[in-house]
Image: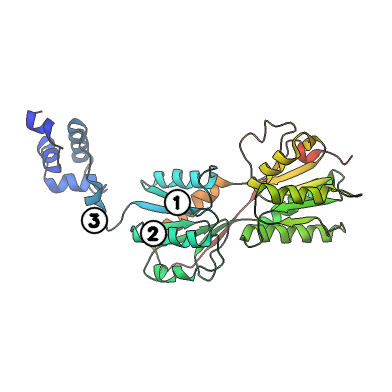
């Protein structure tokens, strides 16, 4: 390699010269044209490796009319997000990059975040909706922007959606506790304005009524913050007939409940929604209803790519099964 080649960034012209092929052939190989013969493709790849050539992604985007980027707007980035991890993995398998932003459970921030992604010319957006009104997305959808909602549907617009079966999940959790002898079962969960919070609270009430168990004072929904959780626990665990078991409506609620009850964790049976790190290391281990985050993330990416390939296809809602993982906390008998 000459001194000039070492000083400047190699180009496709350099690759074509070293490979002994036409410039157009290099372009076809770089853009993964399957019609290029194996022998020619091998020579081009060998020249790329020799020169340490890196394609200009901005130029490739202009040629393809696409950015190669998927936007992902999720509730919270700071605590880790299993579905986002699955979206990232599935996107990389399709040679795409994820631009992730947090909405912090704020409707105005959600709108600003999603519209910012639209302005960045992403190839599609996967969103974990917070608000109940998403009509602001209608012009973007009509212009061809693929949008997929997960965990809860977008309100007021037709988008492909990936959901967990919340009613089935609550039924599994409730039945599990009743099989271990519990009749006074309480629920502490997310705010009703959040789709999953409302769905799970409604399913809990239905389970309680169907089993002939008390509902009054047993359902507590709202913001997930220490003061509110402490107040809910004081209510369900106080009095002459305290709850003997608890269903926590999501991962954040489960963790906050564990912080609040401390050593009393060995006396209160509990089933949490969503698995979380260290749940199996606590004593007792935390019994949970686990969502299949890998399937949810992969399905969201597949629906987005399918919508991109065919914008006129019927809108789909995919419901992903859940599973109950018994670890000890949900198997404690009433005292």
Look at the numbered disc 3 and give the secondary structure of its residue: helix
Q: Position of residue 222 (x, y in %)?
A: 68, 57
Question: Where is mark 2, residue-wise?
Answer: 116
Do the residues bearing badges 1 and 2 touch, measured as CB atoms within 8 Å?
Answer: yes
Where residue 62 is drawn, which disc sits there?
Answer: 3
In this rendering, the answer to whether 82 lies above or below 156 is above
Q: Residues within 10 Å of mark 1 (few under 14, many from 20)?
A: some
Question: How far separated are the C-alphas under marks 2 and 3?
Answer: 20 Å
Counting residues from the start of the chain, the first of labels 1 and 2 encountered is: 1
In this rendering, the answer to whether 81 lies above or below 116 is above
Tell how many labels. Answer: 3
Q: Position of residue 295 (x, y in %)?
A: 54, 48
Look at the numbered disc 1 and give the secondary structure of its residue: strand
Which residue is at the front of the view, 5 or 246? 246
Question: How far separated are the C-alphas under marks 1 and 2?
Answer: 10 Å
Which residue is at the front of the view, 296 or 197? 197
* Tag nearer the camera, 3 or 1: 1
Question: Where is mark 1, residue-wise?
Answer: 101
Identify which residue is drawn at 74% across, 56% down.
Answer: 220
Q: Residues within 10 Å of mark 3 (few under 14, many from 20)?
A: few
Identify which residue is drawn at 76% across, 52% down.
Answer: 187
Q: Is residue 200 left or right of residue 205?
A: left
């Amino acid at each position: 390699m000459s001194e000039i080649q070492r000083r400047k960034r190699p180009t496709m012209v350099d690759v074509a010269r070293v490979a002994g092929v036409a410039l157009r052939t290099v372009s076809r190989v770089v853009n993964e044209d399957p019609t290029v013969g194996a022998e020619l493709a091998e020579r081009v790849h060998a020249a790329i490796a020799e020169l340490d050539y890196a394609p200009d992604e901005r130029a490739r985007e202009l040629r393809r009319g696409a950015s190669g980027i998927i936007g992902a707007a999720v509730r919270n980035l700071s605590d880790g997000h299993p579905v986002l991890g699955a979206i990232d993995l599935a996107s990389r398998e399709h040679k795409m990059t994820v631009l992730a932003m947090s909405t912090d459970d704020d409707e105005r921030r959600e709108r600003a975040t999603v519209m910012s992604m639209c302005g960045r010319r992403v190839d599609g957006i996967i969103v974990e909706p917070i608000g109940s009104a998403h009509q602001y997305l209608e012009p973007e959808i009509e212009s061809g922007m693929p949008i997929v909602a997960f965990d809860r549907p977008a309100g007021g617009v037709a988008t492909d959606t990936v959901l967990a079966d919340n009613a089935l999940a609550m039924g599994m959790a409730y039945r599990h506790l009743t099989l271990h002898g519990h009749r006074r079962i309480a629920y502490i969960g997310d705010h009703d304005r959040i789709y999953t919070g409302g769905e799970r609270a409604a399913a809990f009430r239905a389970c309680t009524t169907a089993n002939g168990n008390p509902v009054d004072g047993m359902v507590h929904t709202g913001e997930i913050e220490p003061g509110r959780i402490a107040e809910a626990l004081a209510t369900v665990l106080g009095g002459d007939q305290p709850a003997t078991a608890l269903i926590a409506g999501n991962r954040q609620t489960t963790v906050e409940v564990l912080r609040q009850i401390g050593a009393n964790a060995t006396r209160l049976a509990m089933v949490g929604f969503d698995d979380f790190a260290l749940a199996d290391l606590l004593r007792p281990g935390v019994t949970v209803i686990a969502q299949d985050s890998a399937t949810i993330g992969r399905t969201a990416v597949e629906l987005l790519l399918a919508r991109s390939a065919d914008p006129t296809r019927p809108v789909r809602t995919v419901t992903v099964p859940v599973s109950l993982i018994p670890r000890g906390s949900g198997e404690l008998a009433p005292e």
